[in-house]
Every structure is written in C-alpha cells, then in structure tokens.
Image: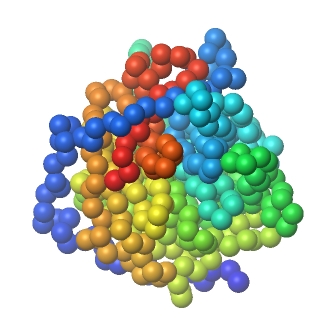
Amino acid sequence: MPARPVTRPQVASTLPAEAAKAPASVIRATASEKVAGQVDLDFNDHDPGTDEKPIGDDVSALARIGDTLFCATDEGSAIESLAWDGKAQRYGAHRCLPLADVFDLPDGDEGEMDIEGLAIDDGWLWIVGSHSLKRSKLRDGDDLSRLPEIKTDRNRCFLGRMPLVERTPGMFEPVKRDGQRRAAALHIRKDGSNAIRRRLGKDPLLAPFMRVPAKENGFDIEGLAVVGDRVFLGLRGPVISKVAMLVELRIADGGRGGLKLAEVTEGLDYLLHPMLLDGLGVRDLLYVDGRLLILGGASMGLSGPQAIYALDAMPARGHHLARDRIHRVMCLPIVDGADHAEGIVTHTDGSTQLLMVVCDSPAPARRKDPRALRADLYRMP
C-alpha cells in the first residue's frame, strides 16, 4: 500500500534545545586514538598510467562480509570488490562491478553516482548515492560568473540493493538475481529526483537545503546503515545549529525490480533523528554488534575535526533516538589538506575485531604504490 502523504513535520522537535545552550565540545588532535596497525587495499587491475584518477584517491564507502571487502568511489558508477589475502596481509584480487550492467541508470555508466554509502544486511548489499547537487569548480583564470552553475547528476539519486551469493567460503559476489531475490532500486525520474528527495524536499527543516550544493552545507547523504527493513541515512549536510541529521526510512519491495518507501510508523513515511556531533556532519555509518557507529567530519570541503561516535542502542521503530545515548568514542588525527576520514568498516585479525578507517584525499604516505591505498586500523571503540 503506498505511503500516505504527511503534512506535519516529522522530527521530534524543531531542534534540540541543548544545541543552542551549550557550545560544542572541543575535539583536539592530541586526543586522537593511536593507530593499532595498517592494511593495504590493492586495486591491482587499475592502470595508473591513464588520465583517470587512481581508485585509491576517491574511496568513499566500505562494506565487508566474510573475507570480501566492497568499496565504492565518489566518481563513476561501479562497485569495487577486494578479497582478504591473509598471507600478504592485504586486500587484493580486485574486481570491478559496473552497476549499469544491473540497474537502469538514467545517465548510464557515464553518469557519476557519487556512491557514499554501502551496507550489508541479511544477504543483501545496499548502495546509496549522495542525492546531492554540485557546483562547478572555480579554476585558475575563471571568472566568478561560473560559480552560479549548479549541476544535477541524475545517477546520484540512487538507492538500491543486490543479493549476495557466497561463491567460495568467505567470498561473496553481488548478483542481479538469486532465485526469488533480485536486484532492485528506487525509481529515478527524468528530472533526477526520486521518492527520497521528493519527500524530504517538503520537510520544514530540510527543504531550504535541497537546492544547495554538497560541501556548501546542502543536502548530502554520506552514510548508510540497514537493519531489516529499516534504512538509516546519515547526512553530511545540512548541519543546522550544530545538529546533524539521521534519516530513518522503511523500504519495501515494489515489484519488477523496484523498491518503494513504506510507512515508518502510522502516518509517517520518514523520521528525522537530530544528533549532536560537536557540530560535525555524518561521513559514514556502521551498524555492528547492536550499536551504530557514526563517523563525523566537516560538512564542507575543509580539513578539520573528525571523530567517531557510538549510539549504544537503536531506537524502537517509530520512536526518536535518545540523544543522550550518543557518545564520542574516538578522535581521529587531523592532517591539513589530506586524510579526510571517509569510510569505516570492521576488520578481523585472528580473533580480534578492529575498526578500519579509509581516507579520501590520502596523504602521500598512503600511496607508496599507485595501485593501493593504505588504511588505518584501530581498536574497536
């Protein structure tokens, strides 16, 4: 049954009162967690001699199941698959999985999807694009008249899932169809919108930011967590009065390779959960061991504080999360102009579960091999 239209705000309160009263706590680089180790992601079939940027420069999302690590970049329209090599202590055996071979993307494989979230739940690989707008970059010699140019890449409004098949022990592959399970996605209209942008575009808090480009505190999805039929989207922007937003949706099978939004609770087809993250936006989400880890970073394209937060218990369906249950559990190093933490995922070393952090705009020390990216490992907070 299609979701009923909602005319009232779907957030617990306009903004939490404590956001206006208390200053954000200071995140100091000197308080950053000590790196417990490092591991290489080896994109060995990528040709670094072409004009195309190396894949390791733009890794924006991660998800792991068994010995298989899925990565995505914020350029292109593919998922990268890597396999854990215990002897070499690295992820390799790189495979590229073009999503245009599976889904009917409005701009085909040439359109940038800006994939910013991956999640695995119940045998499905979920994928979400940023759903954001972008502004033309101002380059040397350009005049300011180029700044007003705001562009829409229709492929960015993607939310879909693919069934996972275990080909060999620990090695998984996303496929178009597995028995009764088939890949499916929300429909993207010709104008580049989908049900998410249309619904949230009517929200009193978010509506003013829907036409603002990403990295200018505009609407920008950069985190994905899935728990059953509950889908949580972390917003890098907007951050409103120091408050970040977590969007909760309920996704149902729409038939014929489609997905649809369903009611989260009676009369509501989405919920906004405000979160105090020291004024940071969401850069990634990871649901693990019954709690939600939140990677926080600057909402705009700046070097600045970055940290990991934990939500100890997920809210019951239809209820707003208790903001006092979110705690900062780890501070990450700040590197001016580089190493912007972009993705988090678990990594298992023997019987020890670690947290892997991958950075965008990697510092040269992470790119000694042009085909690889070095990620940091931390003790699980």
Residue lying farthest to the top in this orientation: 49
Residue at the (61%, 57%) spot, across then down: 120
Q: Is residue 338 above or below residue 176?
A: above
Instruction: Specify whether residue 119 is in view.
Output: yes
Q: Is residue 81 above or below residue 366?
A: below
Instruction: Specify whether residue 143 is in view.
Output: no
Residue at the (28%, 27%) spot, across then down: 336
Residue lying farthest to the bottom in this orientation: 266
Task: Tell me where residue 212 appears, x and y as whole percent.
Answer: 43, 49
Residue lying farthest to the front in this orientation: 351
* Quarter of the figure with the N terminus: bottom right
Q: Nearer the viewer, residue 178 or 240?
A: 178
Dividing the picture into quadrants, the one containing residue 186 is bottom right
Q: Nearer the viewer, residue 153 or 284?
A: 284
Q: Is residue 342 above or below residue 90?
A: below
Task: Tell me where residue 359 appears, x and y as whole percent.
Answer: 43, 34
Identify the coloring: rainbow
Q: Nearer the viewer, residue 137 or 352?
A: 352
Dividing the picture into quadrants, the one containing residue 262 is bottom right
Task: Tell me where residue 302 appears, x and y as whole percent.
Answer: 32, 35
Q: Is residue 380 left or right of residue 193?
A: left
Q: Is residue 292 left or right of residue 16?
A: right
Q: Nearer the viewer, residue 211 or 328?
A: 328
Q: How many marks?
A: 0
Residue at the (73%, 55%) spot, across then down: 164
Residue lying farthest to the right in this orientation: 179
Residue at the (70%, 23%) spot, across then down: 45
Task: Tell me where residue 79 appears, x and y as whole percent.
Answer: 67, 41
